[in-house]
Image (cartoon, grey):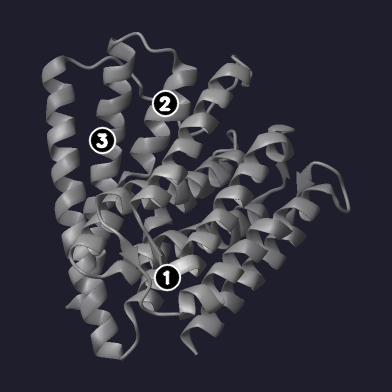
Amino acid sequence: MNFLLIAGGLVLLILGGNWLLKASVALSLKLNIPKIVIGMTVVSFATSAPELIVSINAALDGFPDLSLGNVVGSNIANLGLVLGITLLLGSMEIQKAFYKTDWPIMMVASVLLYFFIKNDNQIVFHEGLIMFLILVVFIIYLLKFQDKNAVFDEMPEDDKPLSVLHILFFLLIGGAGLYFGSELLINGATSMAEEFGVSDRVIGVTVVSIGTSIPELAASIIAVIKKEKAISLGNLIGSNVFNILAVLGITSMITPIKLIDKGLLNNDIFWMLAISFMVLPMVFFPKGMRLNWKNGLILLGCYFGFIYVTIF
């Protein structure tokens, strides 16, 4: 029964996120906002909406470890699982923006998260505000200096104009899907944790985080199969940046996120920092600005190593 609640919640979250994305992009186009701005702001926030709603609801419902575990686990899954599987299906060319902006801001956000939690075992309002302001500065920097001809892989292909009525409809059902999906997911996840005698944090960094990374994984595999532009490393790193700075930043401004299970501070966050860091040397060695199947095997090995250590 718990598995069905989790599966149903994930389906609603994925559908709700897609509907919200569709409405947000259509509204932005109707307001004549440039696509580069839509790609860096609207799309990024919309694709992080499932993690955001899950984290806020989990923290408000008294399950902060589920909130933290979801974000840390999702960041590990994005690079270890999603990037790992994608590289097994084909090599990936890396853009200069990776080491100039994307990777540095991801590491800054990750290290900042570690120190905020280590400081007093919680993330409070002013720390969340600092993270969110860093995100705003980062977005402004990208909008000012990013290549105006850049293409964003996450931009929907069917970004056709919609009527105001259609936009309101998709916003409404998207919001409902996210809300009810998060409720089902949280109820199922916490009940599963009780049933198997593990903490909310373990369920958060494994089951929930893998579930919320399914859209990225599906997009990557479809892109490779169709031999179209593969999901870029920049998009996965961007997702990690938004997970920390937007999801945890906004959630902690609404309610403090308190650490209950110390395993997240003693184990999970170090895996996140290590996998995030190791992507940098992989990009440069042995062949510059390219990742291949060997890198994919290493990343997958690290991910399954993390899952094994976390569960057993």
Q: Residue 69: horizontal and vertical position, in percent?
A: 40, 67
Q: Residue at x 60, y 39 (%)?
A: 234
Q: Nearer the viewer, residue 222 or 166?
A: 166
Residue ID for mark 2:
157
Say few, some or many: other residues with alpha carbon within 10 Å of mark 3 (under 14 / 14 to 19 / 20 or more).
many
Disc ID at residue 121: 1
Q: Residue 110: horizontal and vertical position, in percent?
A: 56, 55
Say few, some or many: other residues with alpha carbon within 10 Å of mark 1 (under 14 / 14 to 19 / 20 or more).
some
Q: Does residue 250 show up?
A: yes
The residue type indicated by label 2 comes to: Glu
Looking at marks 3 and 1 on the same chain, the residue that comes earlier in the sequence is marked by 3
Residues under labels 2 and 1: Cα distance? 43 Å
Residues under labels 3 and 1: Cα distance? 33 Å
Residue ID for mark 3:
20
Looking at marks 2 and 1 on the same chain, the residue that comes earlier in the sequence is marked by 1
Left or right: 183 as drawn, with respect to 104: left
Q: Mark 2 vs mark 1: give the one in front.
A: 1
Q: Quadrant of the N terminus?
A: bottom left
Q: Residue at x 44, y 69 (%)?
A: 120
Q: Does residue 232 show up?
A: no
